[in-house]
Amino acid sequence: MSDLNRAESPPLEVRDVTKSYGAVTALRGVSFKLHAGEVVALVGDNGAGKSTLVKIISGILEPSSGSILVDGVEQRHTTPAEAQDSGIQTVFQDLSLIPTLDIVENIYLHRELFHRDPIRSRLRWMDRKAMRREAKRGLSDLGLQLPSLRTKVAALSGGQRQSVAIARAVLWGSKIVLLDEPTAALGVQQTEAVLSFIESLRERGIAVLVVSHNMEDVLRVSDRIVVLRLGQKIAEVDRDEASHDRIVKLVLGLDVDV
């Protein structure tokens, strides 16, 4: 990532975000930036506030105070749709894929293309050829090797499903992609394929935030690591300065230099 990219407003900035539920504070003054062409990992033990923060960025929750900025402009997302309209896509662990639909149908779910001629457009006939053509082109551009686009998602491997979900987010023009435990429950080969795909997103200039408990994966793909503990950011570590032991100690709250 160039110094010029860092000088510009980052695609995503979390600024002094706090979230309280009555007397319980789930997040307290969390701040960090996510630049174009950068992968940032968000790590922390259970209850550290990771899920709450992701839900705030994704528009599921509103912060009690603080701001989410996209390209330097403060956002007030009250729904996931509003977050998506600003360029933020989140791939949660459930992937939100429909097993009985094929790859193309899942990519265009709720964003179907319809025929433009007067009769068929009035009848709301989907243009399946156009959707297959555009999906094939987009997946090829991303370097994804998948079986026939007519394959039902139920027949795909876990890694292929994860890749389809991430590709769907990218193909719809997202400049910020949040990935929630993207390699959870995947085998070695499937994990390698997903991590390689995440690395390819960096090369495309996508800003990627990865939430993961897997330190090996974090150290493999991330440029920076943001550590949360008990709702606070306690460290932000460049990859070159990170090690498995150091990050684990930070997550557990052990006494280390930060």
Image (cartoon, rainbow, N blue to C red):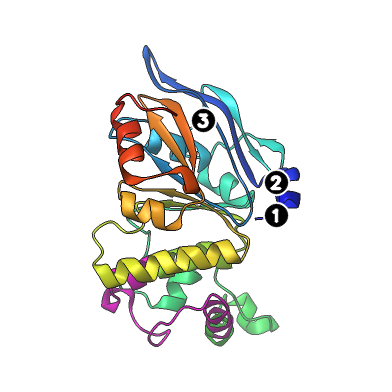
- Say which label, 3 or 2, has the lower sequence index: 2
Residue located beneath label 1 in the image? 2
Q: Determine if the magenta segment contains residue 25.
A: no
Front residue of 149/38: it is: 38
Tag 2: amino acid: Arg
Q: Is residue 43 above or below residue 253?
A: below
Q: Is residue 62 left or right of residue 5?
A: left
Q: Are marks 3 and 2 in contact (CB under 8 Å)?
A: no
The Cα–Cα distance between marks 2 and 1, rounded to whole angstroms, is: 7 Å
Residue located beneath label 3 in the image? 62
Tag 1: amino acid: Ser
The magenta-colored residue range is 133-162
Q: Which label sits in the foreground, 1 or 3?
A: 1
Q: Are marks 2 and 1 in contact (CB under 8 Å)?
A: yes
Tag 3: amino acid: Glu
Res. 164 visible in picture: yes
Q: Determine if the magenta segment contains residue 159.
A: yes
Front residue of 92/233: it is: 233
The Cα–Cα distance between marks 1 and 3, rounded to whole angstroms, is: 33 Å
Residue located beneath label 2 in the image? 6
- The quadrant the N terminus occupies is bottom right
Residue 76 percent location from the top left of the image: 62, 34
For the residue carrying disc 2, how many other residues have a C-alpha within 10 Å: few (<14), some (14-19), or many (20+)? Answer: few
Q: Quadrant of residue 116?
A: bottom right
- Say which label, 1 or 3, has the lower sequence index: 1
Considering the numbered disc 2 on the image, is that residue within a helix, a strand or a loop? helix
Residue at screen point 47% across, 43% down: 241
Residue at screen point 54% across, 79% down: 135
For the residue carrying disc 3, how many other residues have a C-alpha within 10 Å: few (<14), some (14-19), or many (20+)? Answer: many
Q: Is residue 42 above or below residue 201?
A: above
Residue projecting furthest to the top: 23
Q: Is residue 195 above or below residue 47?
A: below
